[in-house]
Amino acid sequence: MGQTQCYKILSEHLVSGELRKGESISIRIDQTLTQDATGTMAYLEFESMNLDRVKNELAVSYVDHNTVQVGFENADDHEYLRTVADRKGVIYSRAGNGICHQVHLERFARPGKTLLGSDSHTPTAGGIGSFAVGAGGLDVALAMAGKPFSIIAPRVVEIRLHGSLSPFVSAKDVILKVLERFGVKGNVNTVFEYTGEGVRTLSVPERATIANMGAECGVTTSLFPSDDNTRAFLKAQSREADFIPISADPDAVYDDLFEIDLSSLEPLAACPHSPGNIKTVSELEGMKVDQVLIGSCTNSSYMDLKRAARILSGHHVAPSVSLGIAPGSREVLLMITEDGTLETLIRAGARILESACGFCIGNHQSPGTDSVSLRTSNRNFYARSGTASANLYLVSPETAAASAITGVFTDPRSSDADLSDIKMPEKFLIDDSMFIYPTFSEEIKRGPNIGEPPENTPLPEIVKGHAVIKVGDKITTDHIMPAGARLKYRSNIPQYAKFVFESVDPTFPERAKSYKDKGESGFIIAGASYGQGSSREHAAICPMYLGIRAVCAVSMERIHQANLCNFGILPLLFEDEKDYERIEEGDELELLSPREALESGHFTLRDHSKGIDVPLKLFASKEQKRMLAAGGRLNEERA
């Protein structure tokens, strides 16, 4: 029986465990990346291990999130990141060089390599054939220290592509079709692997768009084969030496199959407030549009902007629409400047934004009250944009451009533009001058906003306290720890913790702290798919700082579950989902014999307020159980 591409890469990197679906394994990590919103804590955690330099093959620190630099905090963080990178042997990508996933795809990602990034969209590199996984900053810090990364050997779903895309239908529509089928929950410990003759019609940037938004389905990663198109992309980047062919064996056996006829697809949109809420653009035609934003790590490649510009050429943005465009990298910006695309965009009335994450993370370009915003980014969670009343729709660059002209939701197939000659260039305009390579000579600089990673205590014999909050389904890490204007506090946990659950219940931090001050443990009661979205480990660190000891949920997403374990918070699931309804906020709760229960994975939660016992279960590896007992992974490393 042949192997899937996924298991070929895993077998080459296996450090421990049996490579069998559902088993806990550890793999060697070749490459790591961080970005500045998560990187400060990751490098503080790395420093706490007292190592002179990173030990993996390649480590890159990108500055792409907090580039607006409102207040001194962001600039101080960036100076810390620059100097710690130099001291510890990390390549530093300066602000303005571009979004980490776009730049890493262009300059560093390699087929067959493993990549661990402190950002949930790290799987973008699956478009080039890398086994690329998003994780919390601590996991990335450990990988930089040469430690293996633990995952569950995944089930592998084959997504077989047939035919080719019709004009004005794009890779974004492919992944929205996948989201329509698989949704945003229930895909934990799963890998999507793309096969079929339709794959050959997609360039690496198009494949990267599809792999990028696999993260919205909650999968570990997505993989495309490394083939002639991969070689062509690497050659165009002057990196042909990095090419190796890798694909699934013809007789590989998969756990599931989903087939897509590319030629039958039509333009799609993800409607508020979930990437899995899919409708056709034709269903939405005529809806007034107030804002259009093109960019993000999903759709900011050279070809994305070229196609948008071709549709906009000869037209002007509707008077009621604000159009912003953010090239994904400095390389893309240089190329659209050189070939006239930038001038076309400006003449059409576009505002040219920095090559950064920006609007995707709610760091600027917040839409107006009750407005409709069309975006080519990957998430449209409630309030993520910075405006709670706004409605965000995720669309392709083609749909975004066509709608910007008319001022209403518009099917791009109505455009008279000719996109047939827009192909991946044979040679990209390469300029690596914004990378700073380490000299090991800098002194590490720390501003007053930069603190130390907070410490937890080992799991006590008695875990007793209150349900501090009860939340519903699909609570994202944005709900738990807001980004946008709060990002500048990522290095200052006492300050950042003041905003936990800000959009859900702003009184949570004060309530949690009052219980902690009394020596009690805090509990979070949650519905299905708790912790979906970003990899931000602060969604575990800040609740831990406020005294949260356990999250009891109907279901939980992979990265957040791992982050909770990393920081000593028990990630517990209801054995009977109906028990979620029985517990109320404020109930007095107790975990019976928690240290004994940790070994078996079966817990009993006693609700003293209701006079009931609720069975809970823990799905965790042996390594995770050890770190939970120790009060977190850092406690283990410091021991």
Image (cartoon, helix red, strand yellow):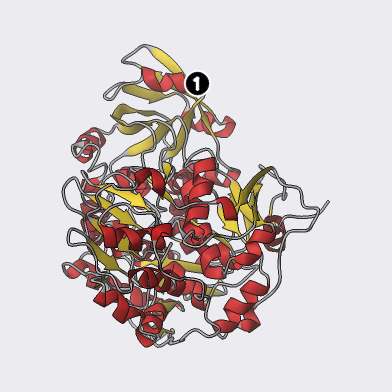
Is residue 218 among the parts visible in the rendering? Answer: no
- As drawn, the residue found furthest toward the right would be 1
Residue 593 pos. (x, y %): 47, 26
Say which of 97 and 348 sits in front.
348
- Considering only vertical position in the picture, is 99 above or below 464? below
Q: Quadrant of residue 225?
A: bottom right
Residue 311 pos. (x, y %): 37, 68
Numbered disc 1: secondary structure: loop
- Count all numbered tags in the image, as a single digit: 1
Q: Is residue 139 left or right of residue 519?
A: right
Is residue 418 among the parts visible in the rendering? Answer: yes
Instruction: Look at mark 1 in the image and give the residue it sits on.
Output: 576
Residue 249 pos. (x, y %): 78, 58
Which residue corresponds to the image point at 61% horizontal and 49% vertical from the top-left? Answer: 260
Q: Amino acid at mark 1?
A: Asp
Which residue corresponds to the image point at 34% horizontal and 13% vertical from the top-left? Answer: 610
- Considering only vertical position in the picture, is 242 above or below 218? below
Say which of 454 and 8 sits in front.
8
Q: Is residue 384 left or right of residue 92?
A: left
Say which of 107 and 468 sits in front.
107
Q: Quadrant of residue 378?
A: bottom left
Residue 321 pos. (x, y %): 21, 60
Callout 1: 10 Å neighbours few (<14), some, many (20+)?
Answer: few
Which residue corresponds to the image point at 32% horizontal and 33% vertical from the top-left? Answer: 522
- Considering only vertical position in the picture, is 551 above or below 190? above
Say which of 398 and 57 sits in front.
398
